[in-house]
Amino acid sequence: MSHFDVRITAIRKADYSDLQSRYENPISHACDIDEGQQWLSECGVKPVGMCESAWESMHLFVEALSRGEGDFYDGWMKNPYSAMISCNDGFRPVSFLIERIEPSCHNKP
């Protein structure tokens, strides 16, 4: 079975400072992802440097795309081998475009 690489691109980062000031305890380190930042998942594996929370939100889609699956939710995306997924941070959510690219790891399990 062929496997595919999956490119993950941070498309948009929101910042809800009103919600932060109302509900969040002050923290010294918040999200450090920048719009346009990219990662490459090989064979559906979490890329080095990928936020754990973001990965939890997207890993099932990344793994499916790496196996050649697609067309999630019967035509949701114009490119059937892609998905737009947001992390689960309610104060500063990041939207990620994940998309299948060329095969790379044919001989890996």
Image (cartoon, rainbow, N blue to C red):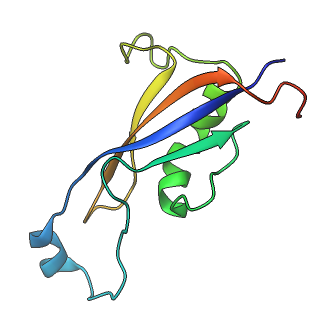
In this rendered view, identify the residue nearer to me: 40 or 77: 40
Quarter-of-image position of residue 31: bottom left
Q: Residue 44, percent across and down?
A: 69, 39
Where the N terminus falls, by quadrant?
Answer: top right
Quarter-of-image position of residue 41: top right
- Residue at the far left in the pictured view: 18
Look at 61% across and 26% down and name the residue there.
65
In this rendered view, identify the residue nearer to me: 92 or 107: 107
Look at 55% across and 62% down and name the residue there.
52
Residue 26 left/right relative to 59: left
Above or below, comparing residue 108 to residue 21 in the picture: above
In this rendered view, identify the residue nearer to me: 104 or 17: 104
Above or below, comparing residue 56 to residue 7 in the picture: below
Q: Residue 81, percent across and down?
A: 52, 18
Look at 21% across and 55% down and name the residue there.
14
Residue 25 left/right relative to 61: left
Numbered marks: total: 0
Residue 84 left/right relative to 98: left
Look at 56% across and 25% down and name the residue there.
100
Where the C terminus falls, by quadrant?
Answer: top right
Residue 71 left/right relative to 4: left
Q: Residue 59, percent across and down?
A: 59, 44
Above or below, comparing residue 97 to residue 51 in the picture: above
Above or below, comparing residue 101 to residue 54 in the picture: above
